[in-house]
Amino acid sequence: MVSEIYNTRNVYLRCMAAIYLSAFSSFYVQIRGLYGPNGILPSHAKLDIQDKRSFFDKFLENPTLLHLAPGFGLTVSYCMELFALTGILLSFLGLVYQKICNLFIFFTLWLLYLSLYKMGQTFLHFQWDIMLLESGFIAVAVAPIIYSKKRRTSPRDQLCFWLVKWLLFRLMFASGVVKLTSKCPTWWNLSALTVHYESQCIPTPLAWYLHQSPVWFHKLSVVATYVIEIALPFLFFAPFRKLRLFSCYGQILLQVMIIASGNYNFFNLLTITLCFSLMDDRHLFGLQNKKKASAMENIVTGITFGLLIYFTVLWFGIDLGKEVPVHSEIRFSAKDFEAALKLAVPASIAIGAISFFFTACTSLYELVFTSRSSLFGYILNVIQYVAYFTVAVFLFGISLVPYSTLDHATRTSLPAFVNRWHGQFDQFHLTSSYGLFRSMTGVGGRPEVILEGASELQGPYTEISLKYKPGQLERPCPFIVPYQPRLDWQMWFAALGTYHHNPWLVSLAYRILTNESDVINLLDSNIYNEFEEDWPPKYIKGSLYTYRYTSSSDQSVTGNWWKRSRVSDYLPIFSANHEPLIKYLENQKILGQPDITLTNTLLASFLNRAWVICSATEPHIFIWALLVSAFVVTRFS
């Protein structure tokens, strides 16, 4: 008999609603500054309002509901606000009321986020965004059409829940593998975490303390990361619960540590949510506790743990009590790893396929031999099972295309029809490739672009601070999970290249010069005090700095969290009437593009009032207020 997952599935769906709530609300408060008519990247420039084709034709080419903006009588950015607010409302209701978490609600949430993603441009193209789209579509399959009064696992629940497990496996395994296939020296010599805490986009205050840890501890932490991301995911498909739960809590531990040390919005919370696919009602709710593990399970679990410890010590040279408390080093070569990967990738696909087949068979057995439904109900269950089985096979099949990029031989051996299916549905982002922290940046210090403004061409220039990223030396980055300040994130990426590759940065400089209030709201509110009567600046430029964490002794003396040194000029001096600047923005379709005429003034007035209310407090506080409110309503309803 298959394990009961009815309640576990419901918890998973409520958590998915919470993730959607965080994602929509985080995005909503930034729409005007990022995509408004006078925003950094106006959204209407991405939508051809002169296109007279039918909505269906336009949607197939570019799947976004924002094609309906003229029908709503709204500009594109107003329509984005409407969709984000709708997503906030639906996900809030789903978090509060279990029966709201059905197929139709999750399909709507997925479609709304896909619509916003398609207009998001560079500010919305992150791995967690495409991961939310994939996991969101799987949630459509997991969610019931309607909630049954029987309150028990249906035959297709295990089948659909398996897709969540497969996504979690691909995410974690690929994230571990790419660290080594990238041949980044810091990952190979286990020194990555000596750099990571200060070089990540927006570290939390705890990251400074972790950065002060001894080198041997950082190296041992990297070893633990490899074990959790590369080895433990194979236990997701183990036939014994103890092994699955052990691998589950290994992933949760890693995600909690990442949350504590870095601001990665809803991403780690979403990963923890996927871990529910490794649990069941017996574990999560203490049901059937009298059922003890068999002797075989205990033996296999003990052998597995022993082998895991043995090969970890062997391959990573774990040694105690010499020059450092714990010594570790990688004792295999890049060629050894590549050879192992050529076996591991096809083997993981085979293991996944066998696990899927076993899950499908046990679910079918439950349907055929244990169903107590009437003849009509039985036929209906069979039809439903076949439909969901077909969807599951399709999603598993197309997921092999991005996953197999880990190994070229596996990639080329996939059937042609699988590649064709993936290509036909790629624009809907039903599945994607993943790989976190592929290579470590900021080895010699984290690069940071600092904007500076002045009222005179010769200066003096005053720093224009952003809200959350490193800037002022005495200010630590705050803890803002699950909010993602997308401008601050892109500033981190901009520092890794040049402004020529980041036209949005030139647009940001222009919007600051012209004092666009919606864009200014994305900056640190203290800039008015810093510039006093000289705001807005008449001239703006950008400088490239290298930031490093201070040591414990320096911090105790100066009180600074950061130290920095200027590297070079980054952005040339611009003024608001600088003709080449204006022509450049026009060529980039940032300036001079016509917007859809606003005719629905009543709905626009409502959106304006909603915006004032929702943006009255700090974004991360706004998000947590929504989440806590939902919890309180759920607790006392």
Image: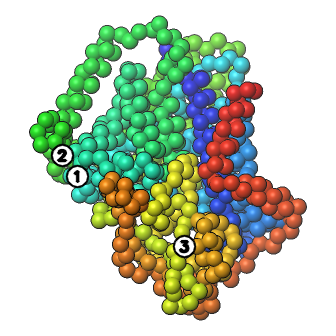
Q: Which residue is mark 3?
A: 464
Question: Few, some or many C-alpha atoms within 10 Å of disc 1 (few <14, some 14-19, many ≥20)?
Answer: many
Q: Residue at x 64, y 48 (%)?
A: 621
> Can you say whether 450 is above or below 345 in the image?
below
| Disc 1 and disc 2 in contact, CB within 8 angstroms | yes
Amino acid at circle 1:
Trp
Asked whether residue 448 appears in the rendered view, the answer is yes
Spatial CA distance of label 3 from label 1 is 38 Å
> Can you say whether 324 is above or below 143 in the image?
below
Q: Which residue is mark 1?
A: 188
Q: Circle 2 — which element?
A: loop
In depth, the one of 34 and 464 nearer the eye is 464
Q: Which residue is mark 2?
A: 330
Amino acid at circle 3:
Ile
> Can you say whether 104 is above or below 413 in the image?
above
Q: In the rendered image, which quarter is residue 556 located in? A: bottom left
Q: Dividing the image into 4 quarters, which one contains the C terminus? A: top right
Say whether residue 497 is left or right of residue 336.
Answer: right
Q: Circle 3 — which element?
A: strand
Q: Residue furthest top?
A: 290
